[in-house]
Amino acid sequence: MAEDIYSPDPLMAGEVIENWVMNKVEDWRDFFESNYEEDFDEYYRLWRGIWDPADRERSSERSRIISPALQQAVESNVAELEEATFGRGKWFEITDDMKDPEKQDVQYLRNKLTEDFEHCKVRKAVAECLINAAVFGTGIGEIVVEEVKEMAPSAQPVMDGQLQAIGVKIKDRTVVKLRPVLPQNFLIDPVATSVEDAMGIVIDEFVSKHSVEILQEKGVYKECYLGNAAPDTDLEPDQELAVYSDDKIRLTKYYGLVPSELLEEELEDFKSDSMYTEAIVVVANGGQLLKAEVSPYMMQDRPVVAFPWDVVPGRFWGRGVCEKGYNSQKALDTELRARIDALALTIHPMMAIDATRLPRGSKPEVRPGKMILTNGDPREVLQPFNFGQVSQITFSQAASLQQMVQQATGAVDSAGIAGQVNGEATAAGISMSLGAIIKRHKRTLINFQQSFLLPFVTKAAHRYMQFDPENYPVADYKFNATSTLGIIAREYEVTQLVQLLQTMQQDSPLYPVLIQSIIDNMNLSNREQLIATMQQASQPNPEAQKMAQLAQQSQLEFQQSQTSALQAQAQESQARAEKYMVEAQLQPQEMEIKKIEAITKNLEKGNEDDKEFERRLKIADIALKERDLNIRDREFVSAREERGPSQVDEQALIQELSS
């Protein structure tokens, strides 16, 4: 299938894989040296404070001082990112599938990874990569898988348990380490913008001879004669030191795509239908092949992570702190050197001497106690002179240039930017200035996490799952960075929280939350203990909670009983009202009955009964009418008293009462 797509390159006929790799290495190194090597060397010298004759701005410049402004900027920015990443201890998190009810495997994997990272000193390696990124613009790290022997003290019973033998327990393990790589030892496809997009990447550096021989003994590398590497100052980590050329090997490791036909010639049991194959090729001293194999990693990823400090569009190499503050640093160094050179002319005494009037063989030196012999009046032979005084404007210029370095790099020291984040500014001005600085740090932090930190954790976890499945469960996990705020951002946030805390009462539900946030942002040794104590104190006591529930239940029952009593009283009052209504309706009937009883009482038998009955009935009617009139008279008098004599219509009132 591959033959149908492309035809073999005739120039590749008879070529071996190590020559193909070294041709790529030479081409890529020529590109790097032409565009970046000189600048990176100067950035390194400015950061280290090393003077070089090429750094002169004037041919007459004598001073060699280098201002520490750029050094402070690099260290401040790196320290801010380190604190933001590792300041809380837990610097990455793992998320599991939402459908998985068991979350213990995720917790175990995170704790196991953290333990192994601490054992392999990953934090130290990451810090070195951050320094490289700040100085050169790009931080690069190689993920190395090694087999180590873990040794631990152990005791074993002997002689049927009567004695114990003290010794060491040795266990073979596979560990994953991060090894920082300097930019002069790293080569990449010139048209690539990332490690994944490149055709290949190369790590070309000097290593100790014994390390290669040990791997040859283990069978990792092929057995061949090594010899010693030829000296090359471009590959040395510190080019200011004298070159040591004994017992070291130039090891060139290529990770990337290799023509499949070259790999087939090297590997007997390898066949491929594609044009290129992801492989690993290791060459010693520029021509001796040590290893060539298909990528052994199950995810087929490259064991290198890299990130730019600040992204330059369309370019792999980024823009670091030294590049940002380069122009300001050079101007500041020139200002300081010019001032020191001028001080040498103005401070040290100089004499103008008439050479014809000095004794033969005399040495015209100026020093305390020196006797100068002259032929004639010394005032006519000797004359001191100077070049004036150093202008005071150079001091203000140097301060302005130092401020420019801080503005270019975003670094803030204890002095701060004059008039903005120090005591000369208001609280609002300080907040605005710190806010701008924090945004720059946050931008770099996010770039570092997404391009370097999370890819490293992911690749390391995959290698542990592949080569150490007994300790690492194989599953698809998602890794997230749990970075926090740096020192400057943390102090800024604590100030805002304290100001917000002063605006509310202690009984507010937000008050303990703000207290916990303030403690969480402080760099205290017992921060976790304080937070745990606060959370425990905020949780209710079970006994107190139970008593409160009982009291609430009793109060509810009491309220229900009161409600029932009020309802019973209301029903009783309603029944009494209905009773009174019925009695009022029955009262006329009772009065009629009493009337009849009164009339018919004590009647004698005879013919006069009917007449007597009628007479009594008339007397009863007259008594009732008289009673009604008396009642109406009393009501009429009371109505006149209430309404007043002038407002009463007697006829209408009488009609009203009679009705």
Image (spheres, grey):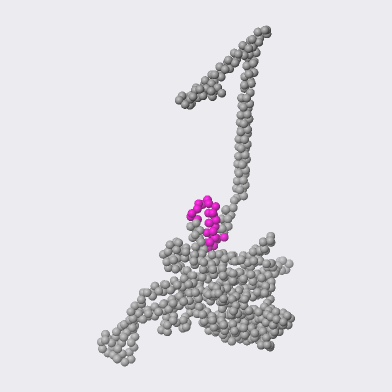
Instruction: State the image coordinates of residue 113 (x, y, percent, origin top left).
Output: 63, 68
Relative to residue 23, is residue 550 depicted above or below? above
- Residue 177 position, x and y percent, is 62, 73
The answer to whether residue 427 is seen in the rendering is yes
Q: Is residue 236 above or below residue 639?
A: below
Quarter of the figure with residue 570: top right
- Residue 290 against residue 577 in the figure, above or below: below
The quadrant of the image that shows the N terminus is: bottom right
The residue drawn where x is 59% and y is 13% is 619
The magenta segment is 501-528
Q: In the picture, residue 4 is in which quadrant?
A: bottom right
Whether residue 208 is visible:
no
Residue shown at the point (39%, 80%) measured from the top left: 341
Q: Residue at x 42, y 84 (%)?
A: 59
Query: Which residue is more in the foreground, 258 or 241?
Result: 258
Residue 324 drawn at (x, y percent): 49, 74
> Would you say 486 lies left or right of 341 here?
right
Where residue 192 sits: x, y (%)?
60, 77
What is the residue that sits farthest to the bottom in this orientation?
A: 360
